[in-house]
Amino acid sequence: MHFLPQQLDDYVVAHSENEPELLQQLTRETYQKILQPRMLSGHYQGRVLSMISKLVNPKNILEIGTYTGYSALCLAEGMQGNGELDTIDINEELVDFQKKYFDKSQYGNQIHQHLGNALEIIPKLNKTFDLVFIDADKPNYVNYFHTIIDKLNVGGIILSDNVLWSGKVIEALKPDDASTKALLEYNALLKNDPRVETVLLPIRDGLTISRKLPS
């Protein structure tokens, strides 16, 4: 979803950081071999994720929704030297694809893949996090928030993707549209929950940055 005229959007991308070669390779192979390649974060949003991670400089990162591993590699760029990134996905067919690119990167030993239901896996992770990226099934966004908020360190950041949902969040809600209904609830939660402060950015399909406040 583009909010800017194409020519201006092209200018924005051209004057942002270049996409690393490994991520270019990952993008090409995703489009050649994997269903729904538009789920990739992509060059521009990937550089946004990388920059935010570098500003946070997290020790521990949690990603909910790995897909082919593009966003995990972007987030890992800002990770501390002794840091770890835990990434969770329910699609077992993508595990080997992800691992191939994780191992090609300098972060292979720091990225831990988890296969299964994130709501079951997260409570078993014996650590707290400085940065969380939520980019999975939309009906569970609220559940993911409530599951990770107590594992997020004060000052920690939650990044939530697709929160504008191709503009459907401002259209009349269809009765059978569970994803849009869930995102409307989620966006309201981030705005009103006293534990976080939030800004919603109109980047691609919408990216929210929420920071955990002291209690």
Image (tube, rainbow, N blue to C red):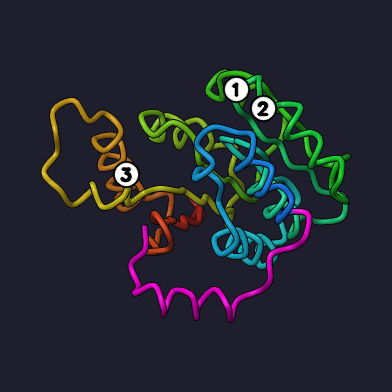
**Which residue: 54% across, 35% down?**
148
Mark toward the start of the polypeptide (1 vs 3): 1
Q: Mark 2 points at which residue?
A: 94
Identify whether 88 is placed above or below 12. Answer: above
Q: How many labels does the image show?
A: 3
Q: Is mark 1 on a helix, strand or loop?
A: loop
Q: Judge whether residue 16 is colored magenta.
A: yes
Q: Is residue 82 left or right of residue 172?
A: right
**Which residue: 68% across, 71% down?**
18
Q: Mark 1 points at which residue?
A: 91
**Which residue: 87% across, 55% down?**
81
> Of the residues shown, which amino acid type is indicated by label 3?
Leu
The foreground one among 9 and 168 is: 9
Measure the alpha-carbon separation of dots 3 and 2.
31 Å
Mark toward the start of the polypeptide (3 vs 2): 2
Answer whether labels 2 and 1 touch (C-beta < 8 Å). Answer: yes
Answer whether labels 1 and 3 touch (C-beta < 8 Å). Answer: no
> Of the residues shown, which amino acid type is indicated by label 2?
Leu
Whole-percent x, y for residue 79 in the image: 76, 55
Whole-percent x, y for residue 130 in the image: 65, 50
The foreground one among 111 and 121 is: 111
Q: Is residue 13 left or right of residue 163?
A: right
Answer whether labels 3 and 2 touch (C-beta < 8 Å). Answer: no
Q: Name the residue under label 3.
A: 189
Label 3 packing within 10 angstroms: few (<14), some (14-19), many (20+): some
Which label sits on residue 103?
none
Measure the alpha-carbon separation of dots 2 and 1.
6 Å
Whole-percent x, y for residue 80 in the image: 81, 56
Q: In this view, does 29 lie to the left or right of 52?
A: right
User: What residue span does the magenta drawing correspond to?
Assistant: 1-22
> Of the residues shown, which amino acid type is indicated by label 1?
Asn
